[in-house]
């Protein structure tokens, strides 16, 4: 059952006394929550973590997920309802394994579910499945999105346009696409990475086609810079992009947020258009329990929330549980840092 005692949820706070929810879902393991408001309800599209026979390795093979559930909440303090499995790896002809962080979008009354998976060549691609309802059932396209690669798709709606942001390094393979083609010189996480003093590998964006099933343009890299306009360097592990892209718009600015991976923060950078460049600002969410940190940001009834995960229930880095906290933008547009691990 989902967390039974909602009152008890009020008791968790971060280092500065900010409210943090308890695990929102406890009957299955969930991670990488992409939250949206569709038809006045909150929908969460997470990864569905499971135990599998695959041993832990540096490429994240132990995140060996095979299906997705969708959850809805009537309001921000309501219990999530599990609508069951919306897509299984066996229903996707091109996908072999590792169904990682997904996202969803609505356009003209249809719902599009975007998901990464490794294909039969063990290369991550991004697929799309379509439904008439946010709860599914979703039907996957027979092929991945043409020209898609790497993982962690996040689709952002800006007026009538939709943009997909994607990519992740190390196990997410983005470093192997530096030439525009998949080139792998080894399987250690840092193989194929730039030198420390070179610009970090950048996340990728592409506008979606009108039918939401393809890219409308060649995917482009987006630059994250410091305050002087210099690209963040590959050796700057505290600030460089690793995975878990998300974009929200606040006061006409575009906030690109992401995980810094091996330094475990959710950081953010601000730009004045969907393609960037984005100027690094700071940390939204400090490390949580567990190696990965992955989030989404959504406005509900005029307040902003961050959905994220940790490993409170299992204590195992690949068996995560979704949580939520309120997010505060300061008057100058910066975001207050959430510090979930108390000193
Ligand atoms: O859930 C599998 C992977 O772990 C995601 O795709 C990453 O963002 C990390 O959270």
Image: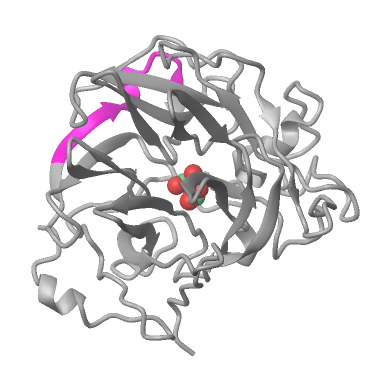
In the figure, 84 relative to 13: above or below? Answer: above
- What residue appears at the point 15 percent right and 78 percent down from the top-left corner? 8
In the figure, 322 relative to 156: above or below? Answer: below
Taking the image as shown, residue 109 lies to the left or right of residue 183, namely left
Residue 90 in magenta stretch: yes
Q: Quadrant of residue 86?
A: top left
Q: Position of residue 316 (x, y in %)?
A: 40, 64
Is residue 182 at all visible to an observer of this figure? yes
Residue 72 in magenta stretch: no
Q: Quadrant of residue 266?
A: bottom right
Q: Position of residue 92 (x, y in %)?
A: 36, 18
Q: Position of residue 98 (x, y in %)?
A: 45, 36
Residue closest to the eye, 36 or 120: 36
Residue closest to the eye, 24 or 270: 270
- What residue appears at the point 58 percent right and 67 percent down from the top-left corner? 283
Residue closest to the eye, 116 or 204: 204
Q: Give the magenta-colored segment's residue range.
A: 83-95
- What residue appears at the point 49 percent right and 16 percent down from the top-left corner? 144
In the figure, 94 relative to 337: above or below? Answer: above
Taking the image as shown, residue 83 lies to the left or right of residue 240, namely left
Residue closest to the eye, 24 or 105: 105
State the quadrant of the N terminus: bottom left
């Amino acid at each position: 059952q989902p967390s039974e005692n909602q009152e008890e949820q009020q008791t968790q706070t971060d280092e500065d006394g900010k409210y943090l929810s308890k695990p929102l879902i406890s009957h299955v393991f969930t991670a990488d929550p992409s939250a949206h408001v569709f038809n006045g309800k909150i929908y969460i599209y997470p990864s569905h973590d499971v135990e599998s026979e695959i041993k832990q390795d540096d490429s994240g093979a132990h995140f060996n997920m095979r299906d997705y559930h969708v959850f809805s909440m009537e309001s921000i303090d309501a219990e999530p309802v599990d609508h069951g499995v919306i897509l299984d790896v066996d229903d996707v002809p091109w996908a072999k394994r590792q169904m990682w962080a997904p996202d969803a979008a609505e356009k003209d009354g249809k719902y599009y579910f975007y998901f990464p998976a490794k294909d039969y060549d063990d290369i991550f691609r991004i697929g799309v499945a379509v439904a008439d309802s946010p709860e599914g059932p979703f039907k996957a396209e027979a092929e991945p999105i043409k020209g898609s690669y790497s993982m962690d798709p996040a689709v952002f709606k800006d007026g009538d346009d939709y943009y997909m942001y994607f990519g992740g390094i190390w196990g997410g393979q983005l470093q192997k696409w530096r030439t525009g083609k998949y080139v792998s010189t080894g399987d250690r996480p840092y193989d194929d990475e730039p030198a420390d003093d070179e610009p970090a590998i950048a996340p990728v964006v592409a506008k979606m086609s009108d039918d939401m099933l393809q890219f409308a343009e060649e995917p482009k890299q987006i630059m994250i810079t410091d305050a002087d306009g210099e690209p963040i360097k590959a050796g700057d592990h505290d600030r460089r992009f690793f995975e878990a892209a998300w974009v929200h718009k606040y006061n006409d600015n575009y906030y690109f947020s992401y995980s810094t991976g091996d330094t475990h923060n959710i950081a953010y950078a601000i730009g004045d258009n969907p393609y960037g460049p984005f100027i690094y600002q700071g940390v939204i969410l400090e490390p949580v329990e567990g190696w990965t940190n992955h989030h989404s940001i959504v406005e509900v009834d005029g307040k902003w929330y961050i959905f994220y995960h940790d490993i409170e229930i299992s204590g195992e880095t690949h068996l995560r549980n979704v949580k939520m906290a309120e997010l505060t933008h300061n008057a100058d547009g910066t975001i207050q840092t959430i510090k979930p691990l108390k000193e």
